[in-house]
Image (tube, grey):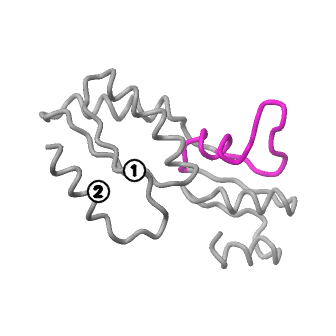
Amino acid sequence: MPLQSQRQVAGGAADVEDRGPSGNPVADQAEALQTPCISSDCPMESYYFGRGGTAAKPFKWTYHLFWGLTELMAVSFDLWSQLPTNKIVGCLWPNDSDGNAFRPAYTPVMKQKGYAVVDGGPFQDGTEDFTSMITQFKKAG
C-alpha cells in the first residue's frame, strides 16, 4: 500500500479512501481498521475475490463500484472485431490480483474468438525492463 494512503487510513485523516486498480491494499487496510472505503475503476472480480471475499464472507466496510470482466471483455472484443488485424494478441499481465483475474478470464475467450495469444508471462509490479516479452511478441508476429 502506498505509504500516504496507509497514513491517511490509519491516521484517521480519511473517512473514505478511493483508489483505482491498486485499491486492494487500501481496501484491506480500511476493512481491518473498520473505516468506510468506496472504490472504483477496477474489475469487481479482482477487487472482491482477489481479497478473499465470498458470498458467505462479504466485506463490511469496503464497497466497490465498477463493471466485471464479462462486461469488459464484451466491450474489448467488440472493439477488436472492428480493426483489421493479424489476430495475434500479445498480453502483459501483472502478477497481482488484477492480472491473476484477467489472464484466466481473457485467454480462453481470445482463443475461442480466433485470436492467437502470446502471453509474456506474469511480471512483478515495478518491472522496468520488458525486453524479453517484447522480443517474444515480435517473434510471434
Q: Name the residue at 21% across, 37% down.
A: 88
Asked whether 13 or 98 is in front, the reply is 98
Seen as rendered, the residue at the extreme right is 34
22 up-or-down from 137: above or below: below
User: In terms of secondary structure, where does tag 1 sit?
Assistant: loop
Provide the residue designation for mark 1: 121
Which quadrant is the N terminus positioned in? Answer: bottom right
Q: Is residue 43 magenta?
A: yes
Q: Amino acid at mark 2?
A: Met
Q: Secondary structure at mark 2?
A: helix
The kind of residue tagged 1 is Gly
In the image, the segment drawn in magenta is 41-64
- Does the CB distance between marks 1 and 2 fall below 8 Å? yes
Alpha-carbon span between mark 1 and mark 2: 8 Å
Task: From the top left corner, tell me how far across and down residue 72 is, in percent.
Answer: 44, 35
Figure quadrant of residue 29:
bottom right
| 135 sits left or right of 13 in the view | left
Q: Name the residue: 54% across, 37% down.
A: 67
Q: Estimate the x, y position of residue 136 in percent, counting from the top left.
A: 23, 52
> How many discs mark residues in the rendered view?
2
In the drawing, does residue 108 fall left or right of residue 3? left
Q: Nearer the viewer, residue 133 or 83?
A: 133
Residue 6: percent from left, percent from top = 72, 73
Please give the residue where the numbered disc 2 appears in the rendered image. 133
Q: In the rendering, at what x and y percent does residue 33 appear? A: 86, 63
Question: On screen, 141 above or below 36?
Answer: above
Q: Residue at x 68, y 61 (%)?
A: 25
Q: Which of the two labelled residues, at mark 1 and mark 2, occupies the earlier sequence position?
A: 1
Q: Residue furthest top?
A: 112
User: 10 Å neighbourhood of mark 1: few (<14), some, or many (≥20)?
Assistant: few
